[in-house]
Image: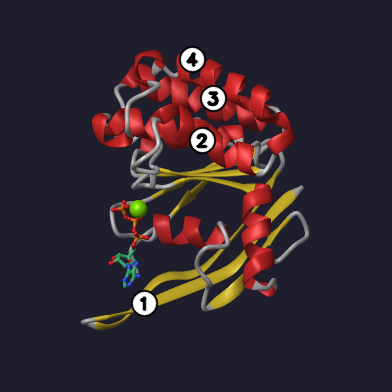
Amino acid sequence: MMLIVNNIKKSFDSPNGKLTVLNGISFEVSAGELVVISGESGVGKTTLLLTIGALLVPDDGTVIFDSQNPYQLSNNKRAEFRAKNIGFIFQQFHLMPYLNISENVSLPAIASNVDNEKQLYSRAQTLIDELGLSERKYHLPEQLSVGEKQRVALIRALLCQPKLILADEPTGNLDEDNANIVISKLREFTQQGGIAILATHDGRLAELADKHIALSPK
Ligand SMILES: Nc1ncnc2c1ncn2[C@@H]1O[C@H](COP(=O)(O)OP(=O)(O)OP(=O)(O)O)[C@@H](O)[C@H]1O
Ligand SMILES: [Mg+2]
């Protein structure tokens, strides 16, 4: 299993005209590797993660994951590809507002693997405990702090057992202890053969990575 990002270019239309954000990004990642994408705010980290995650079509270049180019698939097949392969921890989390934490983390995994409902639900409870959220199981997302929501989004991604986790600032709102727990969970995921790609403005995280992609302003 490999991820190949080849010469990705992306521009946006803006009030100031065409804004070039990604200008030919290339790198390769093997199973078991943790990659950090760093760079200052506005440099294009989220844009790159969305492009890798089959959510934003690049203007040029290719993304190949596990020998497949998701942008050559139909919309339905691309959604299937995402559900099967990718766990996304969004910068704004995108939790379901009317589901409690226990439901938020387990329902997406159960939806695509109904036969394992009991097992997934019990795995969810273990992860909730490990990430220090035991007392928040029945809270709604709006009743959580930002750092708590961040950990919920991580659990949701892990439970779907993806091959690739894309994590946008997964430690951005956490104290050092909780940040370490999140990083060690992502490490555990790569040690089991997954690929994790983290976007962060925290240059220190780059030291922990197997590969470091530093984006710079155009
Ligand atoms: N849909 C869009 N339309 C127009 N411009 C966009 C769009 N999405 C992003 N941009 C611009 O692209 C640039 C990169 O945005 P992006 O969100 O990738 O940055 P980032 O590195 O993730 O920043 P941060 O660290 O603040 O999260 C920004 O300057 C933003 O204004
Ligand atoms: Mg961002």
Which mark identifies residue 120? none
Judged from the image, the secondary structure of the residue bearing numbered disc 1 is strand
Say if residue 154 shows up in the picture.
no
Inter-mark Cα distance, 1 to 3: 34 Å
Instruction: State yes or no: discs 1 and 3 in contact (Cβ < 8 Å).
Output: no
Whether 173 is drawn above or below 217: the answer is above
Instruction: State yes or no: discs 1 and 4 in contact (Cβ < 8 Å).
Output: no
Q: Position of residue 4 (x, y in %)?
A: 67, 58
* Callout in the foreground (3, 4): 4
Q: Which mark is first along the chain, 3 or 1?
A: 1
Identify the residue shown where x is 39% and y is 31%: 100
Q: Which mark is first along the chain, 4 or 2?
A: 4
In terms of depth relative to the viewer, which is nearer, 135 or 148? 135
Q: Which mark is first along the chain, 4 or 3?
A: 4
Query: Mark 2: few, some, or many residues within 10 Å (few <14, many ≥20)?
Result: many
Which mark identifies residue 12? 1
Q: Which residue is mark 4?
A: 130
Which mark identifies residue 185? 3
